[in-house]
DNA sequence: GATATTATTGAATACTGATTCAGTTATCAT
DNA sequence: ATGATAACTGAATCAGTATTCAATAATATC
């Protein structure tokens, strides 16, 4: 028998993060990833079913971590909780810029071809954000019929688009992360409040 | 001599809009575009230098139109003007959903490989939006040192990310465009005001 | 040390799809 | 009508790259 040497699986994921960041998923060559990871090209296929599977694993790991961190937030005021959630998301990507690049460029592929199992963390994050949104809306409309949920989904999407864009800006400008973060949160909070007000009768 | 039959160039662009919307730029096959356009595959290369050039032409045309429409806006209040600019952008994409899909998926490629000439319309639109932003900031900080421009650029990016996301939502939900549009503008305006206030001393 | 078993490798394979170009067709000028 | 020229076509070419797999290396067990 022979043992597996170290955790090649993780080394491959780390190498892939760099290569994807530099070349983007499509142009990234499996051979480049294997070289960066210091393993033979064929070894990739011992740990992953293919190039797409590497991306899947990368995002799956990211969202699983984030979902747990979000679940640990104990802020009871929904507005503050949402603020913390967005902050967590931002920070995790601001710290790992290679991954952030891949997130911005290729996350949509993850959503396209990952199975439900792999998306669990992602779905949990979306759900937790959504709950905060619904609570905020409810607290402003206590006595009226609840606003259509489609409306809060729309607001959530718009907000999240802003967060995404703030990360994009972070990568291309020289601004300090803290400055970008705070501006993003300021605008996000103002946006939510305005959206909530619009839902009122 | 022989004349060119009709305006194949435009037929190719229209066909490409559909094919790109369905398959995305990468997976879209030149052969599929030529078939959809009802021309031979080789003819594509009489009108464009390659697949990438089709995308370039598509976006270039879009931004050139939009830049002109924006320039025609005569709203003097910068906040209202920005509102109108965003509205124009939204409407143009909401009306042509095939193109909107391609915009959302592949616009970054345009920015990557188009030359300055082709980007003129795009740059003009960004500039006009930026000017509105700066005026808004100036009108709130009349007596103080002007806020760093990096700050307004950041706000502009975040705002634009929200607009983008609203379009994404429009394509996947069943919400009427008018509803999405108005929510997007509500949140955008609230975001700008909050960002401007944050810049004050 | 010998054997069995599993891990690893990277050159060869297989496939895809953009681009080319030799051949064909249409239009114009005379 | 006929030659000249330009437009058009799509099968063949060619390049790039994900994946496979026969060969090799490392470890474990006896």
Image: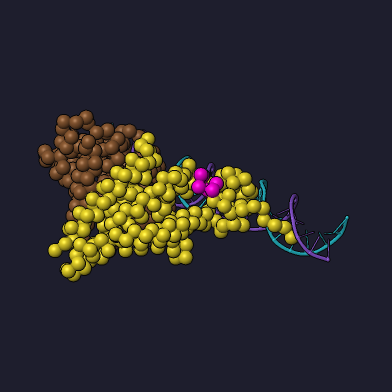
Chain colours: A yellow, B brown, C cyan, D purple
- Is residue B38 found left or right of A138 in the rendered image? right
Rendering quarter of residue D14: top right
The answer to which of A199 and A23 lies nearer the viewer is A199
What residue appears at the point 57 percent right and 52 percent down from the top-left corner? A10
Percent across and percent down for residue A41 are 61, 49
Q: For the stretch drawn in magenta, what is the main secondary structure?
A: helix
Residue at image point 21% right, 41% down: B196
Is residue A15 in the magenta section? yes
Q: Quadrant of residue A196?
A: bottom left
Residue drawn at (30%, 40%) of the image: B154
Q: Quadrant of the C terminus of chain A?
A: bottom left
Q: Does residue B24 appear in the picture of this structure?
A: yes
In this view, the residue in front, A43 or B79, is B79
Could you tell me residue B71's position as x and y percent?
17, 38
Question: Is A118 in front, or is A74?
Answer: A74
Query: Residues in magenta?
Result: A14-19
Q: Is residue B135 left or right of residue B59?
A: left
Report x, y in % for residue A42. Answer: 63, 52
**Is C20 positioned to the left or the right of B112 in the image?**
right
Whether residue A3 appears in magenta in the rendering, the answer is no
Report if residue B89 is visible in the image.
Answer: no
Residue drawn at 36 percent across, 50 percent down: A87
Which of the image's four quarters has the N terminus of chain A?
Answer: bottom right
How many numbered marks are there?
0
Asked where in the image residue B51 lies, by quadrant, the reply is top left
Image location of residue D16, percent across then percent down: 53, 44
């Amino acid at each position: 028998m022979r043992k597996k040497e170290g955790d090649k699986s993780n080394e491959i994921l780390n190498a892939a993060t760099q290569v994807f960041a530099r070349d983007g998923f499509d142009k990234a060559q499996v051979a480049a990833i294997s070289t960066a990871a210091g393993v033979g090209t064929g070894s990739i296929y011992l740990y992953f079913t293919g190039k797409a599977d590497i991306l899947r694993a990368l995002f799956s790991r990211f969202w699983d971590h984030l979902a747990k961190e979000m679940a640990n937030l104990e802020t009871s005021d929904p507005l503050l909780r949402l603020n913390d959630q967005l902050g967590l998301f931002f920070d995790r990507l601001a710290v790992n810029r290679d991954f952030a690049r891949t997130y911005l460029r290729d996350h949509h592929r993850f959503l396209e071809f990952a199975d439900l199992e792999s998306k669990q963390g992602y779905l949990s994050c979306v759900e937790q954000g959504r709950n905060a949104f619904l609570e905020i809306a409810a607290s402003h409309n206590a006595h009226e019929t609840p606003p259509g949920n489609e409306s809060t989904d729309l607001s959530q999407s718009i907000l999240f688009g802003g967060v995404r864009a703030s990360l994009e800006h972070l990568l291309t400008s020289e601004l300090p992360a803290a400055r970008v973060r705070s501006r993003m949160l300021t605008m996000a909070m103002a946006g939510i409040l305005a959206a909530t007000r619009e839902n009122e009768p």
